[in-house]
Image (cartoon, grey):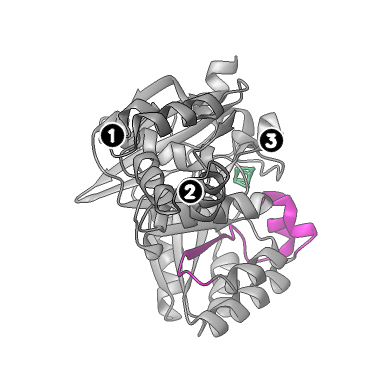
Amino acid sequence: MINLKGLDLGELQALVSQMEEAPYRAGQIMRWIYQRDVEHFDEMTDLSKELRHRLSLCCRIERIQVEAEERSADGTRKFLFRLHDGAMIEAVWIPDGARRTACVSSQAGCGIGCPFCATALGGLARNLTAGEIVDQVLALSRLTGERITHVVFMGMGEPFANYQQVIKAARLLTDPLGYGLGARHITISTSGIVPAIRRFAQEKRQFVLAVSLHAATDDVRDFLVPLNRKYPVAELLAACREYTASTRRRVTFEYVMIRDVNDGLDQALTLSRLLKGMLCHVNLIPLNPVPESGLDRSRPETIHRFAHVLREAGIAVTVRRERGSDIQAACGQLRRSRAR
Ligand code: SF4
């Protein structure tokens, strides 16, 4: 049985042509899957009964299943989903004014091993398919009754370690026959896989690039993002500069603020020197502590001092408002609590 969720227009056209149906049927099926989120072929009322029956014999439309949910007082809702093979992933729905952001996972688990992250503790189970990624957006929309306006690939996993499926999912989410989001409403985050950043610069659609920097020097970043030993800070920032030069799009640098680890004046000054004049934006994120890590979040006054140093150097900075801190909203925490 072929799972239709995750197929793009070309793949659906190939399927309907094998069934000796007209090519426009592919577009109709695509709308039913990604826009109307149907689960059964019977619901595809603009297809003939005969075609619906034939589809049901060889195809299915998979759905991820809700395993658990937590709701924050600020409206944020976090879901633990079970995939068809029993793998567990998390996705978060974040309402903010008129925005409805879906924070989605790209892998079940993660192999990067950042010490402040709950997902890292279980290692990598497997990559997600494009269908499983898109289905997180459809499921969040279905479960909340509201259309998603923005998608961020900042849940479990390193998106660029699953490049093809992540980009395919992002394309399905922006396809006018798919979910129909604007490309600029999709942010893909990486912990710094340099060759993938170069490849991403060649993508035709204007997805937003976010880089989890978290430190300005190799000694600190080697500890916080072990991938830094392969792609050190200078190499990573060189790739980001190439990216901004060739796309004319800015990079968002994520910087999780961890007390007495990466929040000192020395890191702030080095960072402002490294980023000065670059087309970028820095997002300071107070750490959502994971008990096992022994790491704590920076004090508010330290975060403000850090932001001030960067602003003085002319760098655009925001301090991320905490969302869902009363639920287990940091990536991987809900799954971990259920595994215990
Ligand atoms: S922070 Fe991101 S890249 Fe690092 S281990 Fe967690 S999920 Fe992986």
Q: Is residue 30 above or below residue 37?
A: below
Tell me the kind of residue under disc 2: Ser
Q: Residue furthest top?
A: 340
**Residue ID at (73%, 58%):** 228
**Comparing marks 1 and 2, which lies closer to the viewer?**
1
The reply to whether residue 225 is in sight is yes
Decide: few, some or many residues near mark 1? Use Cα within 10 Å; few <14, some 14-19, many ≥20: few
Mark 3, residue position: 126
Nearest the viewer among 223 and 69 is 69
Q: Which mark is residue 99?
A: none
Q: Quadrant of ligand 1?
A: top right
Residue range of the region highlighted in magenta in the rendering: 204-231
Residue 170 or residue 105, whichever sits in front: 170
Q: Considering only order in the chain, which callout, 2 or 1, is on the residue closer to the N terminus?
A: 1
Quarter placement of the N terminus: top right
Q: Quadrant of residue 222?
A: bottom right
Kind of residue at disc 3: Arg
Q: Extreme right residue here?
A: 230
Q: Amino acid at mark 1?
A: Thr
Image quadrant for the C terminus? Answer: top right
Q: Position of residue 70 (x, y in %)?
A: 37, 24
Residue 298 marker: 2
Residue 224 drawn in magenta: yes
Q: Which residue position is annotated with label 1? A: 45
Give the secondary structure at mark 3. Answer: strand
